[in-house]
Image: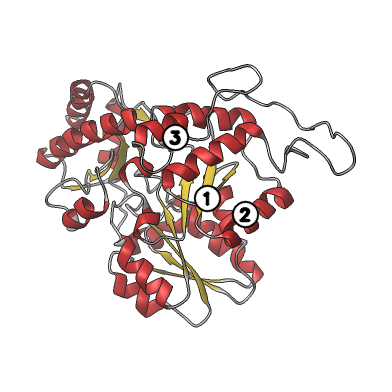
Amino acid sequence: MTDTKTGFSTRAIHAGQAPDPLTGAVNVPIYATSTYAQQEIGKNKGHEYARLTNPTRDALEESLRVLEGGTSAHCFGSGMAAITALITMLRTGDHVLCGSNVYGGVPRLFNQIVANYGIEFSYVDTADPENVRAALRANTRLVHIETPTNPLMSLTDIRAVADICHAAGVDLSVDNTFMSPYFQRPIEFGADIVMHSTTKFLNGHSDGLGGVLVCTRPEHKERFAFVQKCTGGILSPFESYLVLRGVKTLALRMRHHDANGRVVAAFLDKHAKISRVFYPGLPSHPQYDLAQRQMSGFGSLITFETGSLANANALLRRLHLCIVGESLGGVETLISHPASMTHAAIGEEGRARIGITDGMLRISVGIEDVEDLIGDLDQALLAL
């Protein structure tokens, strides 16, 4: 049984992943096929063509559906492909309200591509739910948020925003990439759709791109299955297998990520060369109480202020163990420079408006021995 009465680790290992009925293989096989034999006209064994369905992807979608507590899940070729599919819910003249502090690729997609088709976008700081209420319009059809946000680690009260949205007849989608369903399940707080870049913690090994939308209503299932069929932006069988493999150890990895993240955040918070640390697990975080209510852990994403671009560069050049890279959520520790990486697309003015400086660095703490990570950061900070 892999229903909600079983523990998270049990669901992560077994949901959607029964032994293969043909061979008994414990792991779901990689069904590397584009075509399925038809028994006769209009009769098949449940699969017509791999763009529509694939047994490996089906298994992953069922696994993620169960872990997030949704009614369906739909996997795409990247996190941004999942966001693109999300936007197909809308029509010309509709309005989307988005968090102002989200991954920079999202407003780039919205403003530079989707807006050309007559869909309107506006942005507010969703840390205050009243900002959402005030910004809703008669034509608002979707509110999209990240919590915690990338990279400033600001939280949104999902329940409060969901109540505001539903009172206005608006859907709420939540990017849950940073926390994973192990530490946060937005559907339990009223979210209609949950999005992940499966590239990150769900995969966990920095070796495959992917995205998913987990939904709560029949019309969502119909819409996103149709989008998969029509656009073809699906997750491949091999990368579906990689995420399935990663999900099996998600609970173990997230516990270790979280434990290491707390130690590294405390170290940075006390370091004389660091002026500010953004991490919801620090009691000094302005939304620490909300973090404790809404999340069962604090995760391993930390942003900190070095003071200048020169300082950020000096620190990055001295690192030996922490890897400078644009992604996050892998078993290895990754450190990035938001101003030139994840948020380059929104421009200098856009970054200044939401508080991203040239001296900020974001670290995704891995599962190495935390003493080694502290040692690497400590010696690198000598350059400042």
Horizontal relation, residue 377 to residue 42: left or right:
left
Between discs 1 and 3, the one toward the N terminus: 3
Residue 88: tell me if it is visible.
yes
Disc 1 vs disc 2: Cβ atoms closer than 8 Å?
yes
Q: Is residue 160 left or right of residue 139?
A: left
Q: Residue 310 at x, y = what percent? A: 28, 41
Above or below residue 40? Residue 371 is: above
Query: Regarding mark 2 in the picture, which secondary structure is present there?
Result: helix
Residue for point 36% across, 26% down: 332
Crowd tier of the residue under label 2, counting other residues whose Cα lies within 10 Å: few below 14, some 14–19, many 20 or above: many
Say whether residue 341 is visible: no
Q: Position of residue 206 (x, y in %)?
A: 46, 29
Q: Position of residue 18 (x, y in %)?
A: 53, 28
Q: Amino acid at mark 1?
A: Leu
Q: Which residue is mark 2?
A: 224
The secondary structure type at the circle numbered 3 is loop
First of labels 3, 2 by sequence position: 3
In the rendered image, the vertical position of residue 49 relative to residue 374, given as above or below = below
Q: Residue at x 80, y 37 (%)?
A: 44
| Label 1 SS | strand
Residue 154 vs residue 74, the one in the foreground? 74
Q: Residue furthest bottom?
A: 138
> What's the residue at 24%, 42% (across, down)?
297
Q: Residues within 10 Å of mark 1 (few under 14, many from 20)?
A: many
Q: Of callouts 1 and 2, which one flags the residue occurring earlier in the amino acid sequence?
A: 1
In front: 164, or 282? 164
Q: Which residue is mark 1?
A: 213
Q: Quadrant of the N terminus?
A: top left
Q: Nearer the viewer, residue 309 or 30?
A: 30
Residue located beneath label 3 in the image: 1
Indicate which label's residue lies in the foreground, 1 or 3: 3
